[in-house]
Image: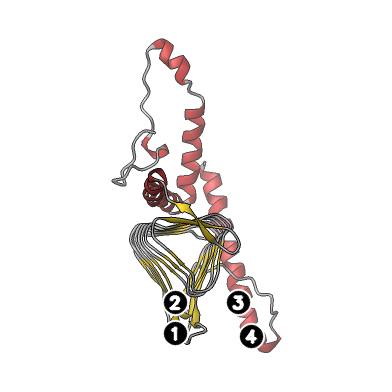
Amino acid sequence: MGTLGRILYTVGFWVRETGQAVDRLGSRLQGSYAFKEQLNRHRTIMNIFDKKPEISDKAFVAPSAAVIGDVHIGEKSSVWYGCVLRGDVNYIRVGSETNIQDNTLVHVAKTNVSGNIAPTIIGDKVTVGHSAVLHACTVEDEAFVGMGATLLDGVVVEKGAMVAAGALVTQNTRVPAGQVWAGNPARFLRNLSAEERAFIGKSADSYAQLGITHAAENAKSFEMIESDIELRKQVAQQSDDYDSHLGIVREKHPDLAFPDKSGSRGPH
């Protein structure tokens, strides 16, 4: 990005900021006559009343997610794009190294049918698949909730249990440890295999690592993104096959590699 490009980008940024500031000032002056459809930036983290989210600085929350109210998120956990965690009438707790994948909805109830308080509690190393719905339920450590599954009020998924994709777990159901439940309504299907138990742990580790990568990418400035694009163009012009015939070994640029488990970047 040349000098002229940087100047135009900076001018464009301040024009947009000024336009929004003028819009807000105009709305204040109009009072009750202001347009109801106001331009409004998405807020990823939002207080409600006196309730404020508490998120570990080592967690990743995607910019298009919404974390609202009394929500705690632990270390190395990740909340992915399009998720909503709404802790308004009760609280949400998410442990460490847990991943809540894209478009998942997590909500709570003030009380359940029996009159008991009904928060949503998600333990450590839990995987919650894309577009799941968790409402006023408990998912214990190292459990797995498949894509599109729905957990209703009072459900308990015990440690190491798996709810299959698309399952509907009805109110106050308990999914015992080591079992797979599936269907609508969800019923016992079979016991988890050793490979599936190992997969649950690997899924948590993989998403904890992937969250570090996405957090780093989302933190980049416009200039850093433009620099990455140029670097990738250079790498695309290289041929590993051609280099191997000539005995050439090229060092991979560290800025184009995923970070390893220590957080440092290395070759793929």
Contact flag, marks 4 and 1 (Cβ < 8 Å): no
Instruction: Say which label, 1 or 3, has the lower sequence index.
Output: 3
Amino acid on which the number 3 mark rests in the picture: Arg
SS type, badge 4: helix
Residue 147 occupies quadrant: bottom right
Instruction: Judge the density around disc 1: few (<14), some (14-19), many (≥20) Cα neighbours within 10 Å.
Output: few
Instruction: Say which label, 4 or 1, has the lower sequence index.
Output: 4
Residue at image mark 1: 116
Contact flag, marks 4 and 2 (Cβ < 8 Å): no
Work out whether residue 207 or residue 116 is closer to the camera in this orientation and state it: 116
Residue at image mark 2: 119
| Dot in front, 2 or 3 | 2
| Dot in front, 1 or 2 | 1
Residue 125 occupies quadrant: bottom left
On residue 24, which mark appears?
A: 3
Amino acid on which the number 2 mark rests in the picture: Pro
Q: CA distance from mark 1 to mark 3?
A: 43 Å
Please provide percent x and percent y for residue 1: 52, 41
Seen at 36% across and 20% down, the residue is 249
- Asked if 108 appears above or below 238 in the picture, the reply is below
Instruction: Judge the density around disc 3: few (<14), some (14-19), many (≥20) Cα neighbours within 10 Å.
Output: some
Q: CA distance from mark 3 to mark 4?
A: 9 Å
Residue at image mark 4: 29
Work out whether residue 138 or residue 15 is closer to the camera in this orientation and state it: 138
Q: CA distance from mark 1 to mark 2?
A: 10 Å
